[in-house]
């Protein structure tokens, strides 16, 4: 999948890294605090081979780094790089668009909260300055969350 | 690809519609003003079968509508719905993230301009209100645009 688009276009470049059904799910999990292969597998539902390939691609693009966390031998964790973490506002923007346009009112699976103020966030706006990382935003269960999703989101924080 | 993710998660829902290498390229083209099958094919480089399948999916999800524009017989155009057009700020946000993080400085393929003020836009911020549609933003060639991309972008406006 990498390099599928040959056009010099910033969107094409983005899709050459993230243009599949799984990569952004893995980034979501990393933002939620997942670091271990087995946890990524459980929390995304991705098949083992596919997950392995996507994690390697994300490491190659500097979104995740693979760290040996064993005191002896090898035991790996995948951690977000600063570049990977910078996707958080964009992913929140995707979630907010999705809530507004893909679900019926009052059935949004997620809500996005500014935890500094407790306010719910609802949209994005384009700015003259580069994207600032918010102090602390959290994705929490919305009115349409399944009990499984509600349980998963409650585990995170 | 539709419905691949079973989780109730707004990101999973988004990826069930747009989680592939081509769908957002097609939406980009529709925002650029492309309406005809052959133009989508030329401007995205998508294979005929794949393009046909993705256009149908986007119509089924209410992102595009298929309109018979022939005075006699059948001749179809694909037009953005209001829901489809609402993706414009999010796509601009993706382009801005991509510019900042996937390209070396001064080699960004695109720039995003607020044409009301002439200012260049650089990032996104999350807001308490739903996303407002900007009056007029345009994606123009950046310093890293190829001559083909530069020519294509110059055709649009």
Image: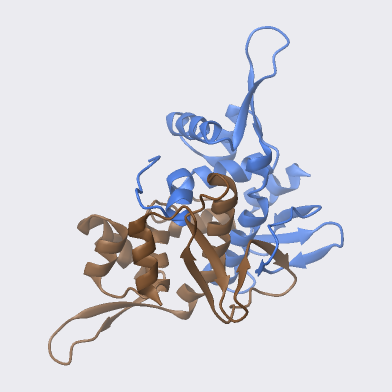
Chain colours: A blue, B brown
Number of marks present in the image shown: 0
Q: Where in the figure is residue B133, as x and y percent of width and height?
A: 58, 78
Question: Is A62 situated left or right of B70 in this image?
Answer: right
- The extreme bottom residue here reads B71
Splitting the image into 4 quarters, where does residue B96 fall? bottom right
Residue in the picture at 59% in, 76% down? B118
Question: Is B147 situated left or right of B130 in this image?
Answer: left
- The extreme left residue here reads B73
Residue A72 visible to the viewer? yes
Q: Where in the figure is residue B31, as x and y percent of width and height?
A: 42, 72
Residue in the picture at 17% in, 92% down? B71
Splitting the image into 4 quarters, where does residue B74 fall? bottom left
Q: Relative to B105, does residue B83 appear above or below in the rendering? A: below
Of A147 and B93, which appears nearest the observer? B93
Residue B62 visible to the viewer? no
Of B84 and A39, which appears nearest the observer? B84
């Amino acid at each position: 999948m990498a390099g599928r688009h040959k056009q010099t276009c910033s969107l094409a470049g983005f899709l050459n890294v993230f243009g599949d059904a799984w990569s952004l799910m893995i980034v979501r999990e990393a933002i939620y605090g997942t670091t271990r292969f087995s946890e990524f597998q459980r929390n995304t539902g991705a098949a083992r081979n596919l997950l392995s390939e996507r994690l390697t691609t994300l490491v190659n693009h500097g979104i995740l780094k693979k760290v040996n966390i064993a005191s002896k031998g090898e035991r790996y964790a995948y951690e977000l790089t600063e570049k990977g973490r910078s996707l958080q506002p964009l992913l929140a923007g995707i979630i907010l668009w999705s809530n507004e346009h893909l679900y019926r009112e009052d059935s949004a699976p997620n809500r996005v909260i500014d935890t500094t103020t407790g306010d719910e966030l609802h949209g994005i706006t384009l700015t003259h300055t580069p994207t600032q990382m918010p102090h602390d935003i959290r994705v929490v269960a919305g009115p349409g969350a399944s009990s499984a999703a509600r349980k998963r989101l409650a585990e995170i924080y």
